[in-house]
Amino acid sequence: MTENWIEVGGLEDIPQLGSRIVQTSQGDIAIFRNSADEVFALRNRCPHKGGPLSEGIVSGRRVTCPLHNWVMEMESGSAVAPDVGCTPVYPVKVEGDSLFLSLQPSNDC
Ligand code: FES
């Protein structure tokens, strides 16, 4: 699979334990940064009722939806049990000072 990387700013544009939204042809994608400076990109729509995951609480590799507290695994895009659902995850990488995003989802959600 070839990924077409698009530059979407730098790591410093995302607050630690926060996110920023990138508007794409796939809809809004939230790029998260955790306390270890790992980055994750998920569609900004909770699989429960469409809550804005970008406004959720980041902890480790998980984000908690601000609406009804579903917890999402940011690597896989899957909800943590007992909740069931998933949201598309997109490849994202840091190179130098720049952040690159691919619009080819890495899961089957
Ligand atoms: S919309 Fe996210 S938990 Fe309900």
Image (cartoon, grey):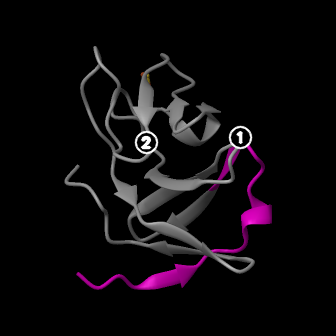
Residue occupying the point 68% across, 53% down: 37
Range drawn in magenta: 1-20
Quarter, ligand 1: top left
Circle on res. 17: 1
N-term-proximal mark, 2 vs 1: 1
* Residue at left offset 70%, top offset 74%: 9
Choose between 9 and 1: the one closer to the eye: 1
Given the image, on which type of amino acid does mark 1 rest? Answer: Leu
x and y percentages locating residue 104 in the rendered image = 32, 71
The location of residue 75, given as percent across then percent down, is 41, 47
* Mark nearer the viewer, 2 or 1: 1
Q: Write the residue at 65% across / 44% down.
A: 34
Q: Position of residue 18 (x, y in %)?
A: 70, 43
**Residue 14 found in image quarter:** bottom right
Q: Which mark is residue 45?
A: 2
Helix, strand or loop at disc 2? loop
